[in-house]
Image (cartoon, rainbow, N blue to C red):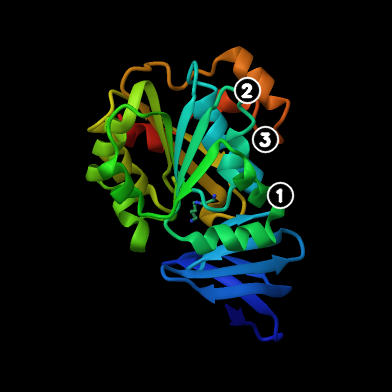
Amino acid sequence: MDNNSLGELWLCEAYHQWGNCFKIKQILHSEQSLYQRIEVILNEKLGKILVLDGSVMFSEKDEFIYHEMIVHVPLCTHPEPKDILVVGGGDGGAVREILKHQEVANIKVVELDSRVIEVCKKFFPNMGKVWESPKVKVENIDGLEFIQKCSKNQFDIIIVDGIDPIGYGAHLFEEEFYYHANRLLKEKGIFVQQTESPFYHFEWVCKIFGKIKKFFHFIAIYTIPMPTYPSGWWCFTIASNSLSNITIPIEAKGKHISKMCKYYNLDVHKSSFKLPNFLLEKLK
Ligand code: SPD
């Protein structure tokens, strides 16, 4: 956080030569947990913003885009998702969206840092109340450690809603993690992970795609506009071993879910898989 020449306080998330800045009206919370610096700041236009180790996780204004798309794309593609694993996701945003799917019976959330959950319960009650659902079970353990010890074929969907591939979350973007993720999925299972900005982190996007591809027969990337993330453009990588049609939603499900959404609908779902040439060329 920096003061500018006018004495205003700004949060600047810098990536080498680029960055995003947010004017801080108030710092609502700041602590060092066992794993990271957790901050909640208030911006007049964006509302409250959750920041982990200086990186914006979401703002109240645009989090719906990210959370609806990381969840409804896989869940509206799978014929009958019952058992869901969320790795990360301690803010509750993804779980809030999963709970819109009545057929889901169990949601296991593996969030390493219990303080993220507690801070979000306090400052983002719209997301934090999901933990009261009897379908939701939380374990505060590292994602890789969790999936290493799990027996195979347990989940219909695995959603990795983590931090960037640097620091303590980096191993969630490695081959060992993808090997176990694949092992844990049931038949028709779908894996999805937030995989950074196609513009700022092009090398990461391609590298991660290559690693996931080694373990799944079918793989695709879809993108969203994400105004508060670096470059404002973000992507998810989705993969499956037995569902060849991972880019095609089940129409009736998508239509039904879109009634409960601010961003997601069937056209958005389908068009999010349309990629520009510079990405297509690299992902062949
Ligand atoms: N650079 C920010 C990447 C953060 C992705 N995860 C956000 C978590 C929101 N539930």
Quarter holding residue 4: bottom right
Secondary structure under tag 1 reads helix
Compute the Cα span from label 3 to label 1.
17 Å
Pointers 2 and 3 in contact (CB under 8 A)?
A: no
Residue at the spot 76% in from the left edge and 60% down from the top edge: 45
* 127 in relation to 11, above or below: above
In the picture of the structure, the residue carrying the numbered disc 3 is 263
Quadrant where the image shows the N terminus: bottom right
- 143 left or right of 179 in image: right
In the depicted view, which residue is nearer to us: 72 or 99?
99
Residue at the spot 50% in from the left edge and 18% down from the top edge: 80
**Residue 79: mark:** none
Residue at the spot 57% in from the left edge and 22% down from the top edge: 103
In the depicted view, which residue is nearer to us: 165 or 210?
165
In the picture of the structure, the residue carrying the numbered disc 1 is 126
Which of the marked residues, 3 or 1, is nearer the chain's N terminus? 1
In the picture of the structure, the residue carrying the numbered disc 2 is 267
* 233 in relation to 189, above or below: below
Q: Within 10 angstroms of label 2, few (less than 14), some, or many (20 or more) residues?
A: few
